Image: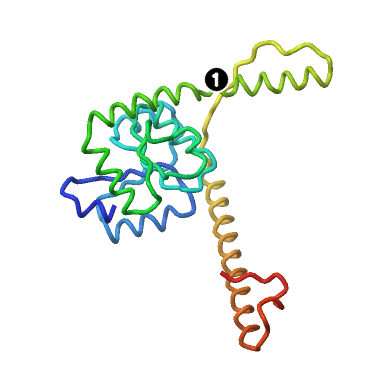
Amino acid sequence: MLELEKAEQPYHLLIAGDGIARDHLQRAAAATIPGKVSFVGHISDREELARLYASCDLFLHPNPEEPFGIAPLEAMASGLCLVAPNRGGLTAYANDDNAYLAEPTAEAFTQAITVACASDDLRRRKVQAARATAESLAWTTVTDSFLQLYDSLHRLGTDRPGMKAASPAFTSSAAQPAEASRLRLASSLARAGFLAYVSAHRFLGLTSLRKGKHPTELKGMQTS
């Protein structure tokens, strides 16, 4: 967003979802780009989520280590142009034909966003290809294939007849306020504990090196 602020065209970032980094992100956004970012929290209603997708021009997915990525695929299914990293699990379905893929840096994402907003024809072609990709990975198609696989394995292992047709269902529910607070506290404590663990190892490693020990004598101690 700081890079996009240099452009003449105004941009507004809308963040849906929740997590332990939300408070930090809100404070950072308010301090650096006030009025340019909105946080809407977790959205469990499918119609409301669909309206949210339809109200945007681009979907930004910045995580380069995503193992698959349901949200980018939902955006593609909604006819929303995807800007995402050129690595990670989402490259199993996202490519240069149906999305704008870029190096996971602010500069590269800014360039991809600028190109996507500048070319209506290219964006429409990518959106059409994205819709076709999303339809081939629809929940009913994917879950039916898994159910058929499990049914085949069960039939081979037990000699029993296959199951009758079953229709899978998908729901998304937000945690209750008290449960969400507990989860956030537990996540914060786990994060603080991990950082303390890393700091302690780093300090002990430096101390040992100052005392003249060779790094190979640190018995598995890793410093980064």
Residue 160 found in image quarter: top right
Residue that sits furthest to the left in the current view: 8
As drawn, is 124 to the left or to the right of 198? left
Q: Is residue 120 above or below residue 63?
A: above
Residue that sits furthest to the right in the current view: 158
Q: Position of residue 22 (x, y in %)?
A: 43, 52
Q: Residue at x 61, y 74 (%)?
A: 200
Residue with the mark numbered 1:
141
Residue 157 found in image quarter: top right
Q: Quadrant of the C terminus?
A: bottom right
Q: Is residue 15 above or below residue 31?
A: above
Q: SS class of the residue under badge 1? A: helix
Q: Position of residue 102 (x, y in %)?
A: 37, 45
Q: Residue at x 47, y 38 (%)?
A: 91
Total numbered badges shown on the rendered structure: 1
Residue 209 found in image quarter: bottom right
As drawn, is 11 to the left or to the right of 219? left
Q: Residue at x 51, y 48 (%)?
A: 65
User: What's the residue type where badge 1 is placed?
Assistant: Thr
Q: Position of residue 174 (x, y in %)?
A: 51, 38
As drawn, is 182 to the left or to the right of 12? right
Q: Position of residue 13 (x, y in %)?
A: 30, 45
As drawn, is 155 to the left or to the right of 188? right
Residues packed near mark 1 inside 10 Å, few (<14), some (14 to 19) or many (20 plus): few
Q: Is residue 8 above or below residue 44?
A: below
Q: Is residue 73 above or below residue 187?
A: above
- What colour-coding does the image apply? rainbow
- Pick whichever, 58 or 109, lies toward us: 109
Q: Residue at x 32, y 56 (%)?
A: 29
